[in-house]
Image: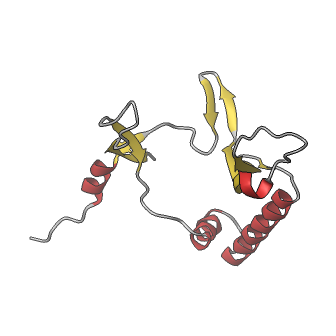
Amino acid sequence: MAVNFVLQVNNNRKSDYYGQQVARVKLLGNIDTDKVAEIIQRNASVKRSDVKAVLAELAEVITDQLEAGFAVKLDGIGSFSPRMHAKYQAVTDAEPYDVEENVKSVGVLFRAERKKTSSGTIQTLMPERKLKRYENYVQQTKPQPEP
């Protein structure tokens, strides 16, 4: 398998790389929980409904643990942890830090699991670095017109 990419021109006039091309991932679509459960059912001895129940519970457990202030590590996948973006602000006792005003967003950070190999460190979810131009993928998979 390969990751599809397209080349895009940097249109940010403030960038040192304005006008230059950069490779960006081109997704082929999204896979939802039903499809994941279907694939797991084909590869394991459990029913799709059981897989969906476990995945739903997993999402709930991760949410609960993140809200409680814990990071959650799933072996072979990676770890989820709470994150926030906030403005830098010098504060004194006279001017306390205003969380509502200074915290821009709160969310979840995902870090894929990594493992060391003889050639360096790789992510376990995408161990190979195969790439394919999206245009080539489209040409190869486009249905041929009937004669």
Q: Residue furthest front?
A: 94
Residue 87, given in percent of the width and then of the height, sits at 69, 45
Q: Quadrant of residue 145?
A: bottom left
Q: Is residue 85 visible?
A: yes
Q: Residue at x 71, y 40 (%)?
A: 88
Q: Residue at x 44, y 39 (%)?
A: 130
- Residue 92 located left or right of residue 52: right
Q: How is the image coloured?
A: secondary structure
Q: Residue at x 84, y 64 (%)?
A: 64
Residue 2, given in percent of the width and then of the height, sits at 44, 45
Q: Residue furthest left?
A: 147
Quadrant of the image for the C terminus?
bottom left
Q: Nearer the viewer, residue 35 or 73?
A: 73
Q: Quadrant of residue 62?
A: bottom right
Q: Nearer the viewer, residue 117 or 62?
A: 62
Residue 36, given in percent of the width and then of the height, sits at 60, 66
From the viewer's perspective, is residue 15 above or below residue 50? above
From the viewer's perspective, is residue 36 above or below residue 12? below
Q: Residue at x 82, y 40 (%)?
A: 91
- Residue 39 located left or right of residue 89: left
Q: How many marks?
A: 0
From the viewer's perspective, is residue 75 above or below residue 62? above
Residue 110, given in percent of the width and then of the height, sits at 68, 49
Q: Nearer the viewer, residue 35 or 111?
A: 111
Q: Residue furthest top?
A: 118
Q: Residue furthest bottom?
A: 49
Q: Is residue 78 visible?
A: no
